[in-house]
Amino acid sequence: MRVDVLSKEYPPEIYGGAGVHVAELVRALRDRDDLETHVHAFGAQRSEQLTSSYDDLAGLAGANPALRTMGVDLAIADACAGTDLVHSHTWYANHAGHLAGLLHDVPHVVTAHSLEPLRPWKAEQLGGGYRLSSWVERTAYESAAAVIAVSAAMREDVLRSYPAVDPARVHTVHNGIDTALWAPRPDEDACRRLGVDPERPSVVFVGRITRQKGLPLFLRACAALPPEVQVVLCAGAPDTPEILAEVEQLVEGLRESRGAAGGVVWIPEMLPRAEVIALLTQATVFACPSVYEPLGIVNLEAMACGAAVVGTATGG
């Protein structure tokens, strides 16, 4: 049986939990002898077998990001010829999955990592394209042969947001992690290289710079931390220049208010897994201030590394 997995994110281009999920899912599927798993991903060319990559269509250069996404989806849908099932992840690939299902007369399965109606701040990033992404997602969910929710709360959100979806077609399969990879591994040298003092307590944040992750809220709250506590931010991939500027201003204000105590470390680049594990192992507290989080994989990773996780009461 051939299964085609469709995703915007796939190694080495991963910036969020959906990409981590897809990478681990594909690894597990390819371990099975009864499946032939093809991957269709956005971005730069990849050398991995049975993996195809797609750049934006040249004719849509300069178009709204949602239209550019839909252009890539057309190419992916065409390339799924010969599959027995398509499985799409996030709205970016949902349109490709929906079209491939119609074009090739095969089932389309959607995994729900987040929902556009619950992310209105995406309008800041996409403008009118947010209405397109919302339409794409609703059409895909209402037509899908099955929808996989990553938590029980996510299943409820799917049914609340899209009441036309038959509840019998929505199945809960919780996100998970590989605890052979994510486990406490102290590495004080790695922490010091990143500017973190392993002798001081720390509160660590790992996530994208987006309204969803609540980073501005977290930075304002950090003003109340004792001066001996470090604030460690592994934060990059801003949704918009505006939210990046807001975070930069808040970080600068926090540094000024802490004065000689210092201890505000901002790491904007994506770190190798080993360095993330070192920071999570060293962390006194891992903070997840998300305003929307269906089931944050990063929380599971932090727990597996022994950090005390404090999160907002939202989602899964």
Image: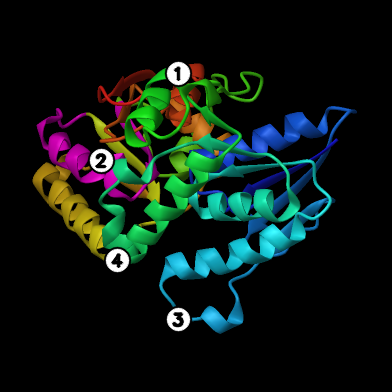
Q: Secondary structure at mark 2?
A: loop
Q: Which mark is residue 127?
A: 4
Q: Going by the image, does 80 lie left or right of 65?
A: right
Q: Distance between the Cα atoms at labels 2 and 4?
A: 20 Å
Q: Which residue is mark 2?
A: 214
Q: Nearer the viewer, mark 2 or mark 3?
A: 3
Q: Distance between the Cα atoms at labels 1 and 3?
A: 42 Å
Q: Sequence order check: which comes first, mark 4 or mark 1?
A: 4
- Residue 61 location, x and y as percent? 51, 81
Residue 220 figure quarter: top left
Q: Residue at x 81, y 34 (%)?
A: 30
Residue 224 among those drawn in magenta: yes
Q: Sequence order check: which comes first, mark 4 or mark 3?
A: 3
Q: Residue at x 68, y 60 (%)?
A: 76
Q: Which residue is mark 1?
A: 303
Q: Nearer the viewer, mark 4 or mark 1?
A: 4
Q: Nearer the viewer, mark 2 or mark 1?
A: 2
Highlighted magenta segment, given as a residue range: 202-228
Q: Sequence order check: which comes first, mark 2 or mark 3?
A: 3
Q: Residue type at mark 2?
A: Gly
Q: Secondary structure at mark 1?
A: helix
Q: Nearer the viewer, residue 73 or 219?
A: 73
Q: Secondary structure at mark 3?
A: loop
Q: Sequence order check: which comes first, mark 2 or mark 1?
A: 2
Q: Sequence order check: which comes first, mark 2 or mark 4?
A: 4
Q: Residue at x 55, y 54 (%)?
A: 95
